[in-house]
Amino acid sequence: MPHARLVSLALVLPLFAFVGVTFVAPLASLLSKSAYETRIHDVIPETMDVLAAWDGQDLPPEAAFAAIAKELPSARANRTLLRLSGAANRLQSGMRSLITRTAQRVPRTEFAGTWRETLAEIDEDWADVQTWIIIESAAAKFTLRHYLQALDLEAQPDGSIKARPQQERVYMPLLWRTLLVSLSVTLLCFLIGYPIAMLIADAPPRRRNLLLLLVLIPFWTSLLVRTTAWIVLLQRQGVINDFLVTLGFLRDDTRLEMIYNMTGTFVAMTHVLLPFMVLPLYSVMRSIPQNQLRASASLGATPIQGFVRVYFPQTLPGIGAGALLVFILAIGYYITPALVGGSSGQLIANMIAYHVQTSLNWGLAAALSSILLVAVIVLYLLFNRLVGIDRMRLG
Amino acid sequence: MSKTYDGEHWIVEGLDLTVQRGEFLTLLGPSGSGKTTCLMMLAGFEAPTRGDIRIAEQSVQGIAADKRGIGVVFQNYALFPHMTVGGNLSFPLEVRGMDKSKRRSRVQQALSLVRMSGFEERLPQALSGGQQQRVAIARALVFEPELVLMDEPLGALDRRLREELQFEIRRIHRELGVTIVYVTHDQQEAMVMSDRVAVFSQGRIEQIASPEVLYEEPTRSFVARFIGENNLVKGEISHVKRGVCTVQVEGGSMTAAHLGDLAPGDRTLVAVRPERIQLRPQTGAYANEFIAKVEDVTFLGDHLRVRFNLFGHAQFIAKLPNIVGHGALLPGDEVRLGWAALDCRALNFEDT
Ligand SMILES: Nc1ncnc2c1ncn2[C@@H]1O[C@H](COP(=O)(O)OP(=O)(O)OP(=O)(O)O)[C@@H](O)[C@H]1O
Ligand SMILES: [Mg+2]
């Protein structure tokens, strides 16, 4: 390799390393948690080794019984047993008590010649192939369990996969809601942002800078401050309700519920994301020469025809960029719904945060994140097909 | 009419101009002299602050640009980048509600007029500057306006292309018989193309006349300086007699053509064309004869460009044909120069 290429390679290497360490690696490790997990496997590693060679038709060999009889009590002593019993119980109820009971009893039960018989004496379910199938799949390193859960599906004892009953579905409705909210917020931002951007782009220089500042100041203000400002405005005893009551439009008991629900989420998110729509639109509008509209008028087009046929089509790249930015930010939005969404205004990101911080079910959090990621990528590709990413302008 | 944008500075002042039907009129003037502003008022993008514009005796005051039916070619083309050439051309026809087959034939016609047939499907970005300009011209003509305005349409093109398109625009003007008001700051372009030229300076028309008249008979010193090359000599008028006046200049007196409004005692600038100057004329042949010192000589093939020191004016230029005897001039030589009274004109005084 020529010297110059080596040098340039050496120069970009730190950058690659930086991106690798700070972005690719954490992302990959998180995503892998959604399908690869050794936490449960490590509760009964020897048993799993034996079961690896098992065909799943008949009962497993004596070695499996011996291994699990050894590992369950020691797992109980290490306080890791709950991982296994919990996971197994999620696949079939009753597994928790079977495992807990067995782990307690094994040391106290007389050895009956083989471990197979000894365990069968503690609970006859150990003589059932089904029990072993569940143990094996609960402790498997590779598992689709989180994905099934994230998609509100469940594996049947016979191995088939079915949707959960309507009232037990949690994540899919939330995902749909998130998509719907993101799309609506994007649309709202477009409807509000387009005239604003046009106003700024057409203003004389002095006024233009002032207006741009009015867009940018909130943009530079802490998200938290802006969101709490909406609480002050929208709450039951807030500025807007007080105002309407004072004017007599509302009675004290009919104050509007504008926050801690979907309305709150909508209003605050639209406000917070608006600059991401306005700025790319503004930059595209500025690049359209003034004489385009003059040309269209000189050719006989009315101002409306000129806007629809000449101006608007030339702003499409800005609309695309703004919409994509707003949508992608909205779909992962977390703080605003958490603060002003109440319980009905929560989005999928809030659920992911819950599983990362509170329930510590990182596998599920990772699966939800991956699904979100795939949804975004699919939409992005779709968008690229329709609009063309290379035509976009990001301000 | 008059126009001010800010209420303080008059960009166009007391403009009074009549364009004949079918005429090719050029507005010529230096940058910032208000040419574009005039054109924009004609097109209806700006309103005159005072005065009125009439087209075929009808005032167009208050008629929006899109109702005037005037074709405009903009300096930087202003083609619609998201439409093909065909789309750009059929746009004015579509907004007029013309049906599809008729549109097609009109578009074809207009494209062949500017020799751009076969480019319908191209996007403007995929055309060269000259091609874009041809399309812009076709677009301004396709809806058959009677009046077409062109604002420095060739300003961005290189010289060869400019000359080619000047010729094309002339040809189109002749073929269609439309009225064209054309803006340029290139005097050569104005001379080549126009029936009449209006010379602008600071929002006023200095002179409006055919190219020949502008060159031969400038009535204002600004025009004399702006069109072609002129020696301008400061002086004061002493006598006026039958269209000829005597002007006192530094180191002598000159006899020049006299234009109406200057009286004895007035300061004046006398314009002398460099090519009208004779070297060593027969004694008594010309009203003006002077001894001048050669400063330097530039050889330009068919002629010599000689700089003289005359009337304390070290930049007095003469263009002398390259004939026997003229080649022998050397800096420092003192020679006799002469020119006819009617080849120099006493014009309004202007500090330079
Ligand atoms: N929209 C406007 N607002 C304020 N002043 C303007 C505006 N448009 C033009 N002017 C001023 O009017 C004067 C004349 O401008 P105009 O564009 O008519 O000149 P021009 O003769 O076309 O010059 P050029 O050859 O450079 O195009 C300039 O001093 C310019 O600054
Ligand atoms: Mg101009």
Image (cartoon, grey):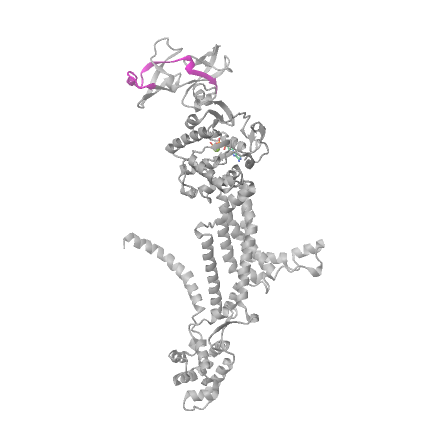
Per the rendered image, the range of residues in magenta is: B320-349
Camera sees residue A289:
no
Q: Position of residue A282 (x, y in %)?
A: 51, 47
Q: Is residue A44 left or right of residue A271?
A: left
Q: Which residue is more in the foreground, A145 or A306?
A: A306
Rendered view: B179 above or below B268:
below
Q: In the rendered image, is residue A372 in sight?
A: yes
Instruction: Give x and y (percent) for residue A38.
Output: 42, 73
Q: Residue furthest left?
A: A2
Q: Position of residue B39 (x, y in %)?
A: 51, 31
Magenta-span inclusion, residue B142: no
Towards the viewer: B250 or A71: A71
In the picture provided, is B124 more to the left or to the right than A167?
left
- Locate residue B30 relative to residue B276 in the image: left or right: right
Quarter placement of the N terminus of chain A: bottom left
| Magenta span contains residue B339 | yes
Q: Residue at x 30, y 19 (%)?
A: B322
Image location of residue B273, percent across then percent down: 40, 19
Direction front: furthest residue: B101
